[in-house]
Image (cartoon, grey):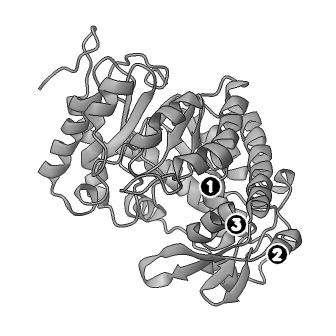
């Protein structure tokens, strides 16, 4: 939290983003559950998505502690209505509580988005988005209890970008709506934000130390929507979300992959406190540190596209040092991955990442890194 508040800690903090439960299995020897367990336990009372989420969150928390991370993280998309069971279209395809369609690929233990049910304004009228009060916060409450005041608890929350385009069936469809049916697009975005803001308020009440606004805004070429559309339709909502957090003295970190240079000043003007991950293939961590490091803290950006999944121990250690050298001086930096610790990452490379951060990331009293 000293790094979050732009101060110099004793060493560079290190953590990971949305650790995939497969790593918990490798570290702890206990298997995570998937949504397919819901089908196999269809007649078992009390076995719902929150049961699965609690089981997996416990494993992830224990694995993060064993890895030596400096924080615990919870994702709001692992929070479901009480007693919730998704609607299965077939054995491997289901609709979630927000009207998004996902497919499960059991051979690689991956669940991925494929479509949404909102094809028209009438579909939006029929969609019953849950009341935020219906959402179980068990995984957050369990994580806060497990943290015990020793670990900061970060909650990954979403606002108004990913949810609407996934519910709509694609970014392309939402972009066309913004031009051709702006009233419909605005109503969809507003409906999602109302749900997300209500959920955010409940999350803050449980007790968190950092909120992550987690909607992606860009790809490798630049923003996925024109800056004009972002400023008109999306940024005002994100600003309201940031203001809600600030009213409770909770700092906010913005996550987005991709090339954010065209909108980075906009994001900072929304009041964010930090940025993740400064994607290494399209943004330069050292440049962002020099330009913005006196205004926001930075978190990232060990390469999880190649280095963490396929790299050698030496390559991982070199990439950790690259990040520390680029952004750690004078504090305000948290070492982490460049997106997430996904299922293709080598678990042993996560261990190396933490180890090298501890070896190399020690501060002197004047805020410089001790070179060794």
Query: How far is mark 3 from mark 2, CA to CA?
Result: 17 Å
Do we see residue 151 in this rendering?
A: no
Query: How far is mark 1 from mark 3, CA to CA?
Result: 18 Å
Give percent across and percent down for residue 81.
79, 61
- Residue ID at (42%, 44%): 260
Give percent across and percent down for residue 164.
68, 61
Give percent across and percent down for residue 252.
58, 33
46 w.r.t. 20: above or below: below
Read off the residue under disc 2: 123
Cβ–Cβ under 8 Å for marks 2 and 1: no
- For label 2, the crowd category at 10 Å Cα-Cα, with few meaning under 14, some 14 to 19 and many 20 or more, is few
Q: Which mark is residue 248?
A: none
Read off the residue under disc 3: 180
Question: Left or right of 68: which side holds 57?
Answer: right
Residue at far top of view: 366
Residue closest to the eye, 338 or 91 = 338
Give percent across and percent down for residue 129.
82, 63
């Amino acid at each position: 939290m000293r790094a979050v508040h732009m101060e110099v800690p004793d060493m560079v903090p290190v953590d990971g983003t949305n650790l995939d439960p497969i790593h918990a299995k490798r570290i702890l020897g206990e298997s995570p559950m998937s949504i397919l367990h819901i089908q196999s336990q269809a007649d078992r009372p009390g076995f719902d998505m929150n049961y699965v989420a609690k089981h997996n969150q416990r494993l992830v928390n224990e694995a993060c502690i064993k890895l030596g991370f400096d924080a615990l993280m919870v994702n709001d998309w692992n929070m479901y209505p009480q007693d919730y069971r998704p609607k299965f279209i077939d054995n491997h395809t289901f609709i979630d509580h927000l009207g998004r369609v996902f497919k499960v690929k059991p051979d690689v233990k991956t669940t991925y988005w494929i479509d949404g049910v909102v094809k028209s304004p009438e579909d939006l009228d029929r969609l019953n988005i849950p009341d935020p009060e219906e959402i179980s916060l068990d995984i957050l409450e369990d994580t806060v209890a497990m943290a015990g005041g020793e670990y900061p608890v970060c909650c990954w929350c979403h606002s108004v970008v990913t949810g609407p385009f996934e519910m709509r069936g694609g970014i392309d469809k939402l972009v066309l709506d913004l031009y051709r049916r702006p009233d419909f697009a605005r109503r969809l975005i507003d409906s999602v934000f109302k749900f997300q803001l209500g959920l955010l308020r409940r999350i803050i009440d449980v007790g968190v130390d950092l909120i992550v606004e987690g909607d992606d805004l860009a790809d490798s070429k630049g923003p996925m929507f024109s800056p004009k559309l972002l400023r008109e339709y999306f940024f005002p909502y994100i600003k309201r979300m940031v203001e809600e957090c600030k009213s409770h003295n909770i700092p906010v970190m913005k996550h987005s992959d991709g090339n954010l240079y065209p909108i980075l000043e906009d994001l900072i003007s929304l009041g964010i406190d930090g940025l993740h991950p400064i994607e290494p293939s399209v943004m330069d961590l050292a440049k962002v540190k020099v330009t913005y490091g006196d205004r926001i803290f930075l978190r990232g950006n060990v390469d999880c596209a190649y280095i963490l999944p396929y790299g050698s121990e030496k390559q991982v250690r070199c990439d950790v040092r690259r990040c520390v050298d680029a952004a750690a001086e004078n504090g305000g930096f948290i070492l982490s991955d460049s997106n997430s610790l996904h299922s293709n990452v080598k678990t042993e490379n996560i261990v190396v990442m933490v180890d090298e951060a501890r070896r190399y990331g020690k501060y002197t009293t004047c805020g410089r890194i001790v070179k060794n």
